[in-house]
Amino acid sequence: QVQLVESGGGLVQPGGSLTLSCTASGNIFHINTMTWFRQAPGKQRSLVATTTSGDNTDYVDSVRGRFTISRDNARNTVYLQMNNLRPEDTAVYYCNAAVRTNTFSPPQIYWGQGTQVTVSS
């Protein structure tokens, strides 16, 4: 019913920048939170940054001041601007969204397929 598609990953040198995008489509009445997670090899998936429909944001300490999350509600899209990237930022980045499909339904969580970010010289 709802699909999330991420884009924007790639290979970048340390100190470089990338912007990830995630667009939700399908049967959408309202999107509450939109969140970026990442999963490095051999590690658990962990939260990177989140934004509410009221544009409140929060970040994990390791990216605060380097990453910026933003959203375009008209386009059902969330962005992650990543600056001053470090090798330890290398991971598959996933977005998720808490989506209501009608006025009576509680929000359900949907996930994208992930996009690889590699920071290496």
Image: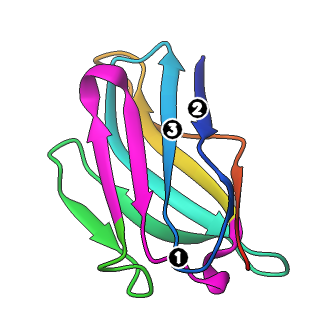
Measured as percent of width and height from the top left, residue 105 is found at 38, 25
Camera-near label (1 vs 2) is 1
Q: Residues within 10 Å of mark 3 (few under 14, many from 20)?
A: many
Q: CA distance from mark 1 to mark 2?
A: 24 Å
Q: Amino acid at mark 2?
A: Leu
Relative to 108, say whether 69 is above or below: below
Q: Secondary structure at mark 2?
A: strand
* Residues at discs 2 and 3 in contact (Cβ within 8 Å): yes
- The answer to whether residue 94 is left or right of residue 55 is right
Q: Residues within 10 Å of mark 1 (few under 14, many from 20)?
A: many
Q: Secondary structure at mark 3?
A: strand
Per the image, is 5 magenta?
Answer: no
- Which quadrant holds the N terminus? top right
What is the span of residues highlighted in magenta in the rendered image? 68-91
Instruction: Tell me which label, 1 or 2, sits earlier in the chain.
Output: 2
Measured as percent of width and height from the top left, residue 119 is found at 68, 73
Per the image, is 70 magenta?
Answer: yes
Disc assigned to residue 85: 1
Q: Secondary structure at mark 1?
A: loop
